[in-house]
Amino acid sequence: MRKRTKAREIVLQFLYQQDIRKDDWLSNIADFELLKEVEDDVAPFAIALMKGTLENISTLDDLIAKSAQNWQIKRMSAVDRNVLRLAAYELIHESDIPIKVSINEAINLAKKYGDEESGKFVNGILDKIKRDIDDGQIKTKS
């Protein structure tokens, strides 16, 4: 498995845990067991994604809710919601990662950890976000 793919899996598991537990995420990053089990060059990328996603979670949730017509974010499955948060963060804040890569990685995470419709669901919402980025309706950190 590629290092960044592994990092994204770890981030998804952390986001899912934080979504369920709703406790102090910042102190939990250092204690997150999966980070202790990976290669040294995987952890910094995973930690950056964790912090970035959680620091921007309100904005990301608003963006996802706007892009997911007829879906409230709280009604999405926890897996789908957190895959979307991670991917939306990457699309907007990680300019060194090609948009196609972020979307494909998110779809694969959704297929692996979600239900049979998760991949299509995530793809549809991320495609809408991508179109809004392309149209200049969403500003990215370049």
Image (cartoon, rainbow, N blue to C red):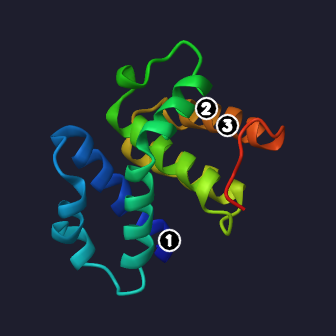
State how far apart marks 2 and 3 are (Cα). 6 Å
Density class for disc 3 (Cα within 10 Å; few <14, some 14-19, many ≥20) is many
Q: Which residue is mark 1?
A: 4
Nearer-N-terminus badge (2/1) = 1
Q: Which residue is mark 2?
A: 125
Q: Residue at x 40, y 78 (%)?
A: 44
> Is 128 above or below relative to 89?
above
Q: Which residue is mark 3?
A: 129
Nearer-N-terminus badge (1/3) = 1
Q: Residue at x 58, y 32 (%)?
A: 120
Density class for disc 2 (Cα within 10 Å; few <14, some 14-19, many ≥20) is many
Instruction: Name the element at disc 3.
Output: helix
**For residue 6, side relative to residue 134 (left or right):** left
The amino acid type of the residue labelled 2 equals Ile
The reply to whether discs 2 and 3 touch (Cβ–Cβ < 8 Å) is: yes
The amino acid type of the residue labelled 1 equals Arg
**For residue 13, side relative to residue 85 (left or right):** left
Where residue 114 is drawn, which disc sits there?
Answer: none
> Is 45 above or below relative to 110?
below
